Amino acid sequence: MARREHTRNLVVLALVALALTLVPHGVSVYLRSFLLFAMMYVVLALSWNIISGFTGYTSFGHVAFYGVGAYACAILVADYEWHWLASLGAGAVVAAVMAVVIGYPVLRLKGPYFAIAMLGAAEGTRVIATVWDSLTHGGLGISLPSAETSMPTYYAMLALMAVTIVVAYAVGHSRFGIRLNAIREDEGAAEALGIDATRYKLAAFTLSAIFPAVAGGIQAYKVLYIDPPSVFFVQITIAMALMSMLGGKGTVVGPIAGAVLLYTAQELTWVNFPTAHLIAYGLFIIIVARFMPRGLVGFAINRGWIRKGMVH
Amino acid sequence: MGQRPDDIALDVRNLRKAFGGVRAVDGCNFAVPRGKISGLIGPNGSGKTTTFNLLTGIVQPDAGQVLYRGEDIAGLKPFQVFHKGITRTFQITRVFREMTVFENMLSVTSLSVPDGAARARAEELLALVNLTHLRGEYGGRLSYGQQKLLEFARALMTDPDLILLDEPAAGVNRTLLQHLLDHIHRLQERGKTILIVEHDMNVIMSHCERIFVMDYGVKIAEGPPAAIQRDERVIDAYFGRRRQH
Amino acid sequence: MERSDVRSLYLLGAFLVCAYALPFVIGLGAGTVRGDAVWLSYLATVVVGGLMQGGVYAMFAVGLTMIFGVMRIINAAHGEMVMMGAYFTWVAFFYLGVDPLLALVFTLPLAFLFGMAVQKVLLNAAVGQPELTALLITFGLGLVMIYTAELIFTTDFRTIPYAPGTVQLTSTIAVGQNRVISFAMAVVITTTVFLFLKFSRLGKAVRATALNAEVAMVCGIDVRRIYLVTTGLAAALAVAGGALVSIQFGFNPETGVLYTLQAFAIVVLGGRGHYVGALIGGLMLAVLENLVSLMVPGGTAMVELAAYGLMIFVLLIRPGGLMGVKEG
């Protein structure tokens, strides 16, 4: 891609970030909250996309990192009186270490087995959080000390989203991203052409774990209470996967668009159909997965509106 | 054999590989001469495919050595073999289908190579195989012949010294085959070493300077085409009474 | 088998031995293990009861392993189909006054049709696609099933009082009557399915397709039809499982989630597409769960952990499980 295009995209991002910076002051707490979570899902979808879209290893347990980040923040702030921002850093480190430790053995597994293993890992982490109550307060959950957190967490999430977009963009449009794609397309051929798949997969996996962890931490500080089921919620992983798929797996714009669209649709549905909204959500998942596996971006590429490929 | 060490590109010594009870490669020895086009042939079940996989790191040997530039590369992983300067192509093309032709090319150079150099090399090779006009198309949308050319060009991105070709003639029409062989000869003229595994006897006999024949997991004959064509052991291996067709 | 293949099998065996020893070790430390005859007979009861429970698990896991084996796709709604079976039975029992086992006569064909419909409408498109497609589709299906059930039946736990009382198997071992009946029924159904797969033409076609769909097609097998039969059969087995579970334990719309994970664990342990493997896996998982429940303090969370732990370690040691090839 020409430097012009990169600059243009950067400017667009800066403008959007600026708009989002100014917005929260004039709006209701609910809307601020809505924007925060929409941004959070952008972060989650983009992160998931790095390992599952670019590299092709479908992680069905990515919520584990989100939950670990949430717990890192909650434990450090509530029990050890850390500053919440510092706890976010700690959460990122823990998630990175966890990603390397889990990733090294698990990334050897092929497609469906990797997905199931990650699902097991996420559920296992949830159960461990429930059982290890000396550290995590178990099923009771952790309450954080009361504070006015709506604004600070909004800005933190905005900053996180901006960083995640830049990183995902840098990965997606670089030769690093191309090599990840090669692993997805044909790992054997990629290895025969000099790509050390183990190292690249591990790098992608670790990178994809850090941002959800920070997002989890921010969310914990915002809501001021977490417990294992709320934070290791399998539907968060589903949301990540669905948003990426809806927008277009393996691209940068795709997960962003998918996250915004899906989260907005979810909120609208939930508000208007409180009882049936989960049934509608289930139907929506079925329809998207069944009929639009390439997502919106794939559709646009087929129509010729967008160029094929990520590096030109 | 009278070859000096630096005349030899790849020295295969006593290579062995068994799958369960089957000894696919059973003490295979041959030395691929530097700067020439060589062929590796043998009837079905001779072990030549397994040997090829052993050389490229896809399969781990049970015993034996593969010396390349004085170093034993037997048992190295495929990406390590690649970084020693050895490339391979595949019998059935394995281009990256959902990536563009240009991206297919760029995927090969290691990240330490600057972007500009990688792109320049990619453009150069695409021009060589006449695929420049398709650089923005998905690899999977190319015709089979175009995919073969793409895979060939892709393998040359890092300017390897030893190129292993896995049945380059498979499924390819005459014209394209001639193109490929022209490219192969040009590579050889520039000092590259090429080893072709093939079933197509015409290709082997017409283009290889040295031929190694395998059967039952060992090399049974080696020599120039003329000698191989007359070699009784080779004829016996392909058409002999032992063999049930 | 190649050397590394055999090695991984031994490693898996060693791991399983450790897995079974672990509850005892923890129990000794936690004081839940006693050496007297009373406790030992209790242990025996738990093991026998676990085996019987495992028979039911194995039955519905066979369905999951069939889908995975024949079509290479994952059914994340399998537990919900079990749950559906439980509710079918409950409705038949409370609203139609039909004996739960007799109800199978019409719930099984219903389930078969349901499975075929799911395959035709939703899953045919997912065959051959990356695993995410089927995972998401079936997950969505599961959600729809859970919340529809919730809408109709609420989240209250339901039970079916059936065959109370115990059966004295030996002088020291007594197992609940409902459990024995469930086990017997599971054996009957599973045996029927095994015979079908081994000896009937359609069954052989299913196995052939699982081994190599392309070759099966060339041999004249209508692969699409096989897919329909496979999912239909899997759904029927799941619903049967639900029926047999419903007469032993309480259930609500969300209990299917745990059954799905357990079924995954069983399929992984037994090996993708291996029916006997699913049988062995089902028995082994149930016994392990019961041992954990008996000796490891910490409640149901520990039982869950046992299932996930088993699954993950099998995946790390030998993804193909006991009966599959090493990589799966």
Image (cartoon, coloured by chain):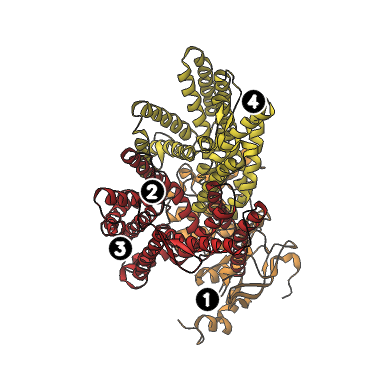
Whether label 3 touches label 2, CB < 8 Å: no
| Residue denoted by label 2 | C80
Residue at mark 4: A84
To the question of a shared chain for discs 4 and 3, the answer is no
* Dots 4 and 1 on the same chain: no
Q: How far separated are the C-alphas under marks 3 and 1?
A: 36 Å
The Cα–Cα distance between marks 4 and 2, rounded to whole angstroms, is 40 Å
Q: Which mark lies nearer to you, 4 or 2?
A: 2
Which of C234 and A110 lies nearest the eye of the viewer? C234
Q: What colour do you see for chain A? A: yellow
Check chain identity for marks 1 and 2: say if they share one: no
Q: Amino acid at mark 2?
A: Glu
Specify the label residue B43 is tagged with.
Answer: 1
Q: Are marks 3 and 1 on the same chain?
A: no
The residue under label 1 is which amino acid type? Pro
Q: Nearer the viewer, mark 1 or mark 2?
A: 2
Query: Mark 3 belongs to which amino acid?
Result: Asp
Type of residue at label 4?
A: Trp
Q: Which mark is residue C222?
A: 3
Q: Nearer the viewer, mark 4 or mark 3?
A: 4
Badge 4: chain ID: A
Colour given to chain B in the rendered image: orange
Pointer 4 local density, CA inside 10 Å: few below 14, some 14–19, many at least 20: many
In this rendering, do the residues under marks 4 and 2 share a single chain? no
Q: Tell me, yes or no, if residue A11 can be seen here.
A: yes
Sequence-wise first label, 3 or 2: 2
